[in-house]
Amino acid sequence: MQPKRLTPRDLEPLRALVGEAAVDYALVLGGFHFINRIADLLHVDPEALPERLRGFEPLRRFGVQVAARLFARVDLANRSDMDRSARVSEVIRLAVEERDARSSLSRELLLRVQRDVEAALPRQRAEAEGFHARPGDPVDAFVFVGTRYAARTTRAMVEALLAQGFDDLGILDLAIAVADANQWARTHRLLAIEPTRYYLDVDVVSEGG
């Protein structure tokens, strides 16, 4: 509920049980976080989707398969020839490759999403609950709600994106970008990785507490 305050200390209880395999758990959980946030953002039950978005279901399944392949390509078992830093770097490299190769969004928009996620990331429980004023711009509003409480995206928010020129694939890619930025915002804090290792050009300082 307070992801902006995550630090490597939050992994210590798990590390006490499984040792350095805690890093692998964090990466796998990050993958599930990514998939679940996309599902929440798009309300993937076809009956719950706005009519214009029901064509998303095959694309969503494809996106989940891409994420599954991403983690399948990385050997997360403890290996003597690959230390923790190298394992994490391999995951980040593959994630960036998948994102850049498949997204229809511009590099500038991906950077904007990442900055908006960092700005909206809850620092305290109250910021992940209740209702808060959201930005007026449709993209910024989608990122804000998608970061604070993803399941609260509404038909009106999606229609505002459509009115701004996004098509169904563009909205899907926007949801993927929001989920991607949220995943790595948490992962870099837990694993003490410099944000510039995975963000495009963002210089962000982790905030502990």
Image: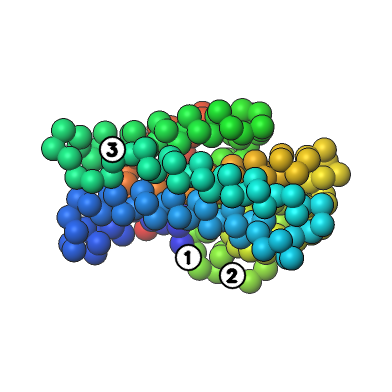
Tell me the amino acid under the disc marked 1. Met
**First of labels 2, 3 by sequence position:** 3
- Residue 96 visible in the shown view: yes
Front-most of 42 and 139?
A: 42
- The Cα–Cα distance between marks 3 and 1, rounded to whole angstroms, is 27 Å
Residue at image position (82%, 57%) is 51
| Cβ atoms at labels 2 and 1 below 8 Å apart | yes
Position of residue 81 measured from the top left corner of the image (x, y, whole percent): 16, 33
Q: Residue at x 50, y 68 (%)?
A: 125
| Numbered tag placed on residue 87 in the rendering | 3
Tell me the kind of residue under disc 3.
Arg
Q: Position of residue 157 (x, y in %)?
A: 77, 55
Provide the residue designation for mark 1.
1
| Residue at the right extreme, as displayed | 163
Residue tagged 2: 129
**Badge 1: how crowded within 10 Å, few (<14), some, or many (20+)?**
some
In primary-sequence order, the first of circles 3 and 1 is 1
Is 201 rendered above or below residue 87? above
Q: Residues within 10 Å of mark 3 (few under 14, many from 20)?
A: some
- Give the number of the disc on residue 64: none
Left or right of 103 in this view: 69: left
Q: Earlier in the sequence, mark 2 or mark 1?
A: 1
Side of 166 where 72 appears, left or right = left
